[in-house]
Amino acid sequence: MATKTRAVKAKKPAALPKFISPQLATLVDETPEGDGWLFEVKFDGYRTLTAASGDRVRCYTRTGLDWTERYGAIPDALAKLKLDGALLDGEVAVVDQHGHSNFADLQETLKHGGKALSYFVFDLLALGGEDLRRVPQLQRKERLKTLLKRAKPPIFYSDHITGAKAGRLMLQTLCQKQFEGVIAKRADSLYASRRSHDWLKIKCAAEQEFVIIGYTLSDKDREFSSIVLAVNENGALTYTGRVGTGFSVETLGSLYKKFKKLERATPPVKEYPREIRRYTKWLEPKLVAQIGFANFTAEGYVRQGKFLGLREDKPASAVKREQPVAL
């Protein structure tokens, strides 16, 4: 007698998770010590949360902007994994053959279709309809590693190390090799959509966002000489200096076009060096620049700054001065 076989109905993937605000790290002056921490490489890119279920994928910036179409092969690579209602947290970056990430290269790549982008995933916030934010950090990473074991470039699991003094040694090694820095996370911490001391960032060099509030005229054959910067402090914009390096010919032209549309007659800050008044064009504080610099002067101005690119994932109203606090 022939045996009847029953067709097994494929399980329908879980619903696509909704975007949540990411957890943010606090900048500190040194790595923590003790067995309760794990340490990851810090990448210089765009923080990205990704919802993936079956062949449906949506990639979001830290403020919830949908950048799926801008991220090149990343969405398709995640769709091939056929994840079941996963919400991933990570960083989209461009890395060279030595593993260094570079924000300026990221900007150029996004302008030209995003073909060289990589997605370094370091957290798993939901899976199969289950909210994992109340699961301890180390357990979330263990589940994430298993989930991404079949992943291929441009998707990468962002691994970590542990140990009482591992963070200090890791930072020393990465800084010697000119990497961005280290992220330290409490191994038993839960995921919180805010800045906290459960996640810490330790940088090899100073780099942060600033609001562009003006530009200075040039007496040479170029569109402008420098950009004028500010941050939000005590409910108002505070002048933080000027930066005149890091601009390619193409960048000068594209920025100048944006500047001309934002010009205003009065400065958006109350206090600034009077000597720059004569040759400065003031702007509506809409654009955000990523700046690398040596440090802040005693007056609070950027020293030895270099323009790295515009940030499109963060509003000007959220830009504040970042200075490392004592651990």
Image (spheres, rainbow, N blue to C red):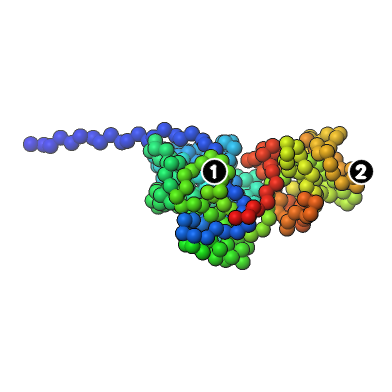
Of the pair 92 and 295, the residue shown nearer to us: 295
Of the pair 323 and 291, the residue shown nearer to us: 323
First in residue order: circle 1 vs circle 2: 1
Label 1 secondary element: loop
Q: Give the left or right position of residue 159, taking residue 101 as reference.
A: left
Q: Is residue 298 above or below residue 314?
A: below
Residue found farthest to the left: 1
Q: Position of residue 189 (x, y in %)?
A: 47, 47
Residue 190 badge: none
Q: Which residue is drawn at 62% across and 45% down?
A: 110
Distance (Cα) linking label 1 and label 2: 43 Å
Type of the residue with mark 1: Gln
Q: Where is residue 258 in the image (x, y as percent from the top left)?
A: 76, 39
Please give the residue where the numbered disc 1 appears in the rendered image: 23
Q: Residue at x 87, y 46 (%)?
A: 273
| Pointer 1 local density, CA inside 10 Å: few below 14, some 14–19, many at least 20 | some
Of badges 1 and 2, nearer the viewer stands 1
Please give the residue where the numbered disc 2 appears in the rendered image: 278
Q: Is there any visible trace of residue 253 in the rendered image?
A: no
Q: Position of residue 234 (x, y in %)?
A: 73, 39
Type of the residue with mark 2: Arg
Q: Which residue is drawn at 73% across and 36% down?
A: 235
Q: In this view, does 115 lie above or below 237?
A: below
Q: Is there any visible trace of residue 292 in the rendered image?
A: yes
Q: Where is residue 309 in the image (x, y as percent from the top left)?
A: 70, 48
Q: Which residue is drawn at 90% across and 50% down?
A: 219
Q: Give the left or right position of residue 128, taking residue 167 as reference.
A: left
